[in-house]
Amino acid sequence: MRVLLITNHFHPEPNHLKSMPFVQELRRRGHDVDVLTGFPNYPGGKVYAGYRMRWTQEEEIDGVRVTRVPGYPSHDASAIRRITSYVTIALSMMAHVFRLRRSVDVCHVYLGPLTLMWPARLLRWWTGCRIVADVPDLWPESVTDSGMLPRWLSGMLAAWCRRSYAAADRIVVPSAGYRRAMVQAGVPAERIDVIYQWCDPRVVDGGPLGLAPANMARSFQVLYAGNMGKLQGLDTVLDSAQLLAAAGHDVQFTLIGDGVEAERLRRRAEDERIANVRMLGRMPIEKVSALQRSADALLVHLVPSRLSNVSIPSKVQSYLSSGRPVLVAMEGETAQLVERSGGGVCCAPCDAGAMSEAILKLSGASAAERDDMGRRGRAFFDRELSFERGIGHFERVLLSAVRRGRAPARLAWMWLAVQRAMKRLADVAGAAMGLCLSAPVLVVLAVMIRARLGSPVFFVQERPGRHGRTFRLVKFRTMRDAVGADGQPLSDEARLTRFGQRLRSWSLDELPQLWNVLRGDLSLVGPRPLLVRYLERYTRMQARRHDVRPGITGWAQVNGRNAIGWEQRLALDVWYVDHWNLWLDLKILALTLKRVLLRDGISQEGHATMPEFVGSSDGAQQQD
């Protein structure tokens, strides 16, 4: 299975789920995976050191082919800049779809911005590949709930989202709540799979313990790790820290990550002198993992909304894998999941008092009780949320999409039809111009042939054309009539005169075929029409040379002409059928002129042209 992963952020040091661990595991299972993505700039909106924005950059990361395309980098709260970012990265990817060097069976789209469906749909229209849409954030709710767009645009945005989701062959969502929301929006339930987000395997088993600073060792450690945006509502965490400090409780909050709210939160903590809060910024995932396992409680918080009620933040899986108690300040799917796991406690969101009470409940429990809670959460993670379980399910979804077969490649078919029409117009124009310009030469050659070889001047023979339909090929005569004692014609070598050899060496005997081109029997470029009796001798693969109109010159003619063997010649003809385009025809015409001037490859050694084709020498190929 050949997979193209389209994602707006594929980091050299990945910190989201559909990145390097996911790709490497698919490759380990025998699938070929390429990545089309932007230049790394998440979450700060600045291109990472070592990269610079350019038209395209191809690199290989641990054996994975990654193509990076430009886009306007922005992850701040500005709706205009964010829309510009989403649109520009999608348009860049659409421009690069036509430059992909490898065919694709299924396009896996990680739908951060929904605009990434544009290049995926274009690729399906072009190649017929299937689309699996991976939906980490539910649109339009993730946009309207964040406050970036006015509510009056939500109707149009919802309609656009429905059309985008409808274009996917399969859809993967991270919670049952997402699935219900999509079904209510009109997406067929049978096309939606629920696969809980997994965490990077390095989070589960990486890094040493005990990285908390020594002066904090006696405090009750509450850790938050992840994005710091408006939806996370982290002011409630600062409020809770102030309440606990004012009441004399020794609780230390650690916030790890970055985002549009990070700087404001940092300034607030400094301005209000909230001493029991420290903000560490972004750091490698291994260090985050170690800090999580050193904490006494791991915090997740989202402001109440339609989206937060049905979503499960990816940090929940990471927290459960750490084997530490989880404090969920949310309602809906996330709270239900953590309660089902037995690995944590829940409280109301955006309520500093409720959060403080939940923290005191955990700090008041014994270390053994907290450890037991963490073990239950880790056991639930291993059963339900592990990387191996999730990627196995995802692999089955990708394979099920591929088994549906290729979709109609509408754009490719349309472009092919346009190219064929242009090729036919070029054939008619070229043949008509060629006949007009060569008319004096044709008359002189006809007179010379009549004088030297007699009548008839033209050689006419039935040849197979496109799809094997026969037509009457017209050439100048190059052989004399000569028969042996038995009344049968002599061999080609015996009948070919020196004059005829000269006609062939300069390809002048081919000029009358311009009439066949004008009639539509031939093209200027294509596999040379051979003998009718060869039709039954081709393998199925070799017979594909008749899928296109034959030509006066072709790919085999400019790569050896009659001097190469039959197997190679027919293989070159089939290669031309599979790779035909207008630029290739122009290249063949230019190479043909060179071949004619050099006069090479006219015949195979010991033959006037080539020996008779008796069939493939490869018995296995005959069964192809």
Image (cartoon, grey):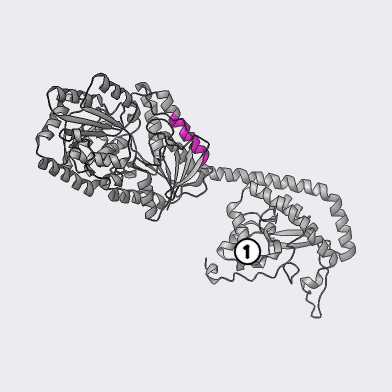
Going by the image, does 185 lie left or right of 445? left
Q: Which residue is mark 1?
A: 568
Magenta span has 46? no
Q: Nearer the viewer, residue 460 or 208?
A: 208
State whether residue 206 is above or below residue 229.
Answer: below
- Residue 20, relative to residue 165: is it above or below? below
Q: Is 163 or 339 nearer to us in this picture?
A: 339
Residue at the location (30% across, 21% down)? Answer: 267
Q: Bounds of the magenta span?
A: 85-96
Q: Is residue 259 left or right of residue 437?
A: left
Is residue 467 in sight in this rendering?
Answer: no
Give me the residue at 26% from left, 46% from top: 204
Outermost front residue: 214
How far across and down, in percent of the image, does residue 294 sit? Answer: 21, 40
The image quarter in which residue 213 lies: top left
Residue at 74 percent across and 53 percent down: it is: 594
Tag 1: residue type?
Gln
Q: Position of residue 571 (x, y in %)?
A: 60, 61
Magenta segment main secondary structure = helix
Q: Nearer the viewer, residue 281 or 7?
A: 281
Residue at the farthest bottom position: 485
- Residue 84: image quadrant is top left
Q: How many marks?
A: 1
Closer to the camera in the image, 531 or 396: 396
Q: As drawn, which residue projects farthest toward the top?
A: 271
Q: Residue 236, image x and y in percent?
A: 22, 25
Kindly tell me whether residue 14 is visible in this rendering: yes
x and y, in percent, of residue 235 in the image: 25, 24
Judged left or right of residue 483, residue 250 is left
Q: Quick one: label 1, few (<14), some, or many (20+) residues within 10 Å?
A: few
Secondary structure of residue under mark 1: helix
